[in-house]
Amino acid sequence: LGTGAPKGGEDVAMFIPLFFVPQGVDYMFGIVGIPVTEIAFAAQELGIRYIGMRNEQAACYAASAIGYLTGRPGVCLVVSGPGLIHALGGMANANMNCWPLLVIGGSSERNQETMGAFQEFPQVEACRLYSKFSARPASVEAIPSVIEKVQYLIAVRSSIYGRPGACYVDIPADFVNLLVNVNSIKYTECCMSPPVSMAETSAVRMAASVIRNAKQPLLIIGKGAAYARAEENIRKLVEQCKLPFLPTPMGKGVVPDNHPNCVGAARSRALQFADVIVLLGARLNWILHFGLPPRYRPDVKFIQVDICAEELGNNVRPAVTLLGDINAVTKQLLEEFDKIPWHYPPESKWWETLREKMKSSKAASQELASKKSLPMNYYTVFYHVQEQLPRDCFIVSEGANTMDIGRTVLQNYLPRHRLDAGTFGTMGVGLGFAIAAAVLAKDRSPGQRVICVEGDSAFGFSGMEVETICRYNLPIILLVVNNNGIYQGFDTDTWKEMVKSQDATIVAPPACLLPNSHYEQVMIAFGGKGYFVQTPEELQKSLTQTLADTTKPSLINIMIEPKATRKAQDFHWLTSSKM
Ligand code: ADP
Ligand code: MG
């Protein structure tokens, strides 16, 4: 391969595992080791961007983010047994999020199977629960017939057709260095883009009529709409019909958060009293409180738009189901509203209710943000961050309060620019996601930054990926919002008092982490810039400096009040009962 590559007719190794190359797969994240090392080298020589990570789990999160952001799967390359098992977290997360992903795992030699081979594990079976397709190319006798290529083709196609998801292809060790004749290799052509399906015309007409008759309508924009690249048509629908809309966490930015029709700041109110809700690529799972009372009216009419037929009717009986691609279906709806023009009256009582709630909710956050007491609270931190955030940045976020409060304050102006714990509520995704977004930013829009807002606990899951960030000099600014714990922690004095007379292994509460940890030193250790900040002034200054300096990644460790929490909510988080 590469410059010394044999020309036609010669025997060459390593072609077999690389059949995905012509499938529009540009990025590979992984960790090398037996038996996949050669695959990584070969991929890099073939022009695939290979990013070596520190744990397969983070590598898999990164590869899955590429799938969501680009619509073509990223590859996660892992070694056999434990390597593959580490990646299962990423596969599960991708599959739950409906994101395309291709995991390629080396496995032990076939003639040692069941003998206790090195890292032997039933990998194809193991991946089945976490993927929509899991297979090993057929026997060595068939090489290099079409079969192997077909496995890759199916995997890539399957990951992006229908509801997107994770796919696994298993490469036994004895395949990797197999010599094959160059002339006998026929590369499969790149699989076609997913076919676009439209909803039934009668259903579209009915949906338009239900929307027209709504007294208190609401559009919910989910990450399915972001993935579908439906931003232009959805924005038209919002503006032409003058409808209020609510983005889900990763639906943020499909229509900008600062759009006058965005009712994000009145979320609970909007859900609770809407009489017609159009779901654009969002499932009625825990994130949307299952679509059930008391969070919704018992008589609310749902219009569900989804590419996955099995999703339609989950948890509620929808008034109308529109099976199809969100972008195409939104266009169909727009055509209905072109035929018989209509818009929702902007001076309605409903708008008044929503606007009032947004105003009071923003005022309450602002009041908390303006508190001068130290250590800072979440709102103070996020208001200062929001002030300086570049409009085109990716926002990656995870943590409990860090993610939930951050989401309400930090604004997204562009689609597919927010990545977080997602449908599966996965902690530990942040650094992998940030790395993927930063690699894309570096390749496609130089100068663009990735702001990764992590709780201190969340940061710990993949903290060593800071080395990866520094090795590739990625344009990432890590903010660790540090409350010394999971949910809540202790201040240094309380902690010292607690452990003074007894062994910490006995008294340390399960939720607490070592107080006053200097996470910024991790970044400094690898040559990046680190800041330890305790006041709003220090925070502002470090943000200004780090945003101005594009030469290095940085980490700002932001100390906050260990007992800081959210402002009063109408509903308890994750429960349906009223507070
Ligand atoms: P959120 O977390 O934002 O609520 P979900 O992940 O729950 O979003 O829902 C996304 C939905 O979008 C899934 O049900 C998925 O099937 C659907 N989806 C993904 N791509 C498309 C598409 N191109 N057209 C229509 N629906 C899509
Ligand atoms: Mg914490």
Image: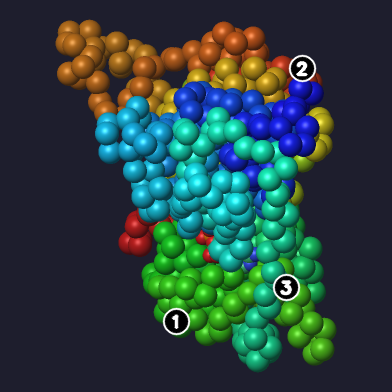
Residue beneath disc 2 = 551
Q: Quadrant of the N terminus?
A: top right
> Mark 3, mark 1: which one is toward the viewer?
3
Asked if marks 1 and 2 touch (Cβ < 8 Å), the reply is: no
Along the line of sight, which residue is nearer the eye, 344 or 475? 475
Measured along the vertical axis of the image, is residue 447 above or below residue 219? above
The residue under the point 65% across, 13% down is 529
Which corner quadrant of the image does residue 278 belong to?
Answer: bottom right
Label of residue 317 in the image: 1
Q: Is residue 100 visible?
A: no
Could you tell me how far apart the alpha carbons at marks 2 and 3 are, in whole angstroms? 42 Å
Measured along the vertical axis of the image, is residue 3 above or below residue 410? above
Q: Is residue 401 left or right of residue 366?
A: left
> Mark 3 belongs to which amino acid?
Ala
* Label 3 environment density (alpha carbons within 10 Å; few <14, some 14–19, many ≥20): some
Say which label, 2 or 3, has the lower sequence index: 3
Which corner quadrant of the image does residue 247 belong to?
Answer: bottom right
Q: Is residue 305 left or right of residue 491?
A: right
Is the CB–ligand 1 distance for label 3 below 8 Å? Answer: yes
Say which label, 1 or 2, has the lower sequence index: 1
> Mark 2 belongs to which amino acid?
Thr
